[in-house]
Amino acid sequence: MLPPATADPISAKSFGSGVVVCAADAYADPSVEVIHGDCRDVMPLLPEGVFDACVCDPPYGLHVADWDQDVPAVEVWREVLRLLKPGAVLVAFAARRLYDVLGWRVRQAGFEVKDQAIWMYRGGRAPSLCHLLPAHDPILIARAPGKPIPINVDEARIPWLNEEDKKQASRINPLRAAGRRRPVYHESLNAYGHEAFVANDLGRYPTTVLATDDVLGSMSHIFVVPKVRNAKAHVSAKPVELMTQIVKVFVPKGGVVLDPYAGSGPVGEAARLTGRKAVLIEMTRAA
Ligand SMILES: C[S@@+](CC[C@H](N)C(=O)[O-])C[C@H]1O[C@@H](n2cnc3c(N)ncnc32)[C@H](O)[C@@H]1O
């Protein structure tokens, strides 16, 4: 399916200058294919309608590196759309101040913007005293036209913090649960009082907020992942656990996810860990 001259097994030496984020045993995994090249050249070579989702962390357009001069153009997203199956999801990280540009370009390409999630973190730096301290990045969620592919709720539930947390959430709300004979979770009733399977024994329904672990006290509806604590990490490294949750939610089990801006490859690692396949495109080779 892919041009053999550019296809390489994933390798710690494949990206940036000595960047290492993925677990060592991911590198030879046949379920993750890495194509070195500019995604604008590579994507037109791939067949249409083969991917179950696109999860990516594209250039934000903030000039933090040579490759970060602009938000990807409408043509890029049009090409992503061509490669996706009908109804498949596009998940793309964005800069707070250029989220609107990304959204507009994705819409112009033919996607329907469906939602927004956020990734909360600490350690951001305010560019000047005229700015707030950055503490989150928005995540755009869009869909290709066609029958929507359902998300994988049970696989991606937010684990209960502990037994007490679960007990609290499962106390019967007498008003909303009127007439029920069995305990139900507070959160398993939607706004109209109908059971919506928002919470069950496996955990809470996945929400639009994801966070790294240095952010919180006990905000139990938030999916929490460890911060990247690796001095050699990619300049825009996203934690593998963050991408794993996103892949779990949006990529059907056994499906294939595309990441045209792979960086150090956390989407590939997430796919490998969760029984999906991935095709990664990255233009920067190891020094
Ligand atoms: C924001 S970084 C992704 C970082 C990644 N999330 C990680 O955790 O390592 C974007 C990546 O896209 C790559 N890139 C930028 N423009 C590209 C293009 N046109 N084709 C392929 N890769 C590109 C850059 O080299 C960079 O590694």
Image (cartoon, helix red, strand yellow):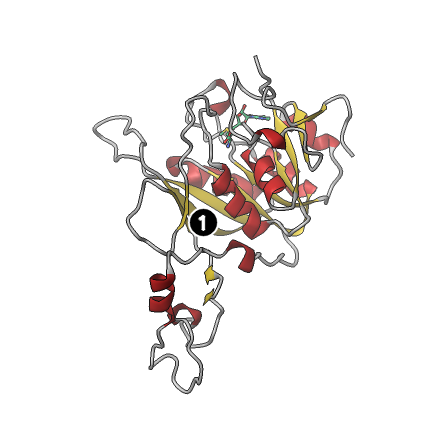
Q: Is residue 30 visible?
A: yes
Q: Going 74% across and 41% down the picture, which residue do you hit?
A: 48
Against 121, residue 194 (above or below) is below
Q: Label 1 CB, ligand 1: below 8 Å?
A: no
Q: Residues within 10 Å of mark 1 (few under 14, many from 20)?
A: some
Quadrant of the rendered image containing residue 164: bottom left
**Can residue 153 be seen by looking at this rendering?**
no
- Can you give x and y, in whole percent of width and height, for residue 222 in the image? 38, 52
For the C terminus, the quadrant is top right
Q: Is residue 48 left or right of residue 12?
A: right
Image height of 163 relative to 36, above or below: below
Residue 158 appears left or right of 45: left
Q: Nearer the viewer, residue 175 or 79?
A: 175
Q: Residue furthest left?
A: 129
Viewer-closest of 72 and 193: 193
Percent from the top left, x then y, of residue 224?
A: 40, 46
Name the residue furthest top: 287
Mark 1 highlights which residue? 116
Q: Quadrant of residue 190?
A: bottom left
Residue 259 coordinates in the image, percent (x, y): 60, 36
User: Which image quarter holds the N terminus?
Assistant: top right
**Element assignment for label 1:** strand
Disc 1 residue type? Gln
Query: For this rendering, which residue is in front, 199 or 55?
Result: 199
Left or right: 139 as drawn, with respect to 10? left
Q: Is 52 located above or below residue 200 in the figure?
A: above
Q: Residue furthest bottom?
A: 179
Q: Quadrant of ligand 1?
A: top right
**x, y percentage for residue 90?**
57, 45
Of residues 175 and 105, which is closer to you in this image? 175
Q: Is residue 12 left or right of residue 190?
A: right
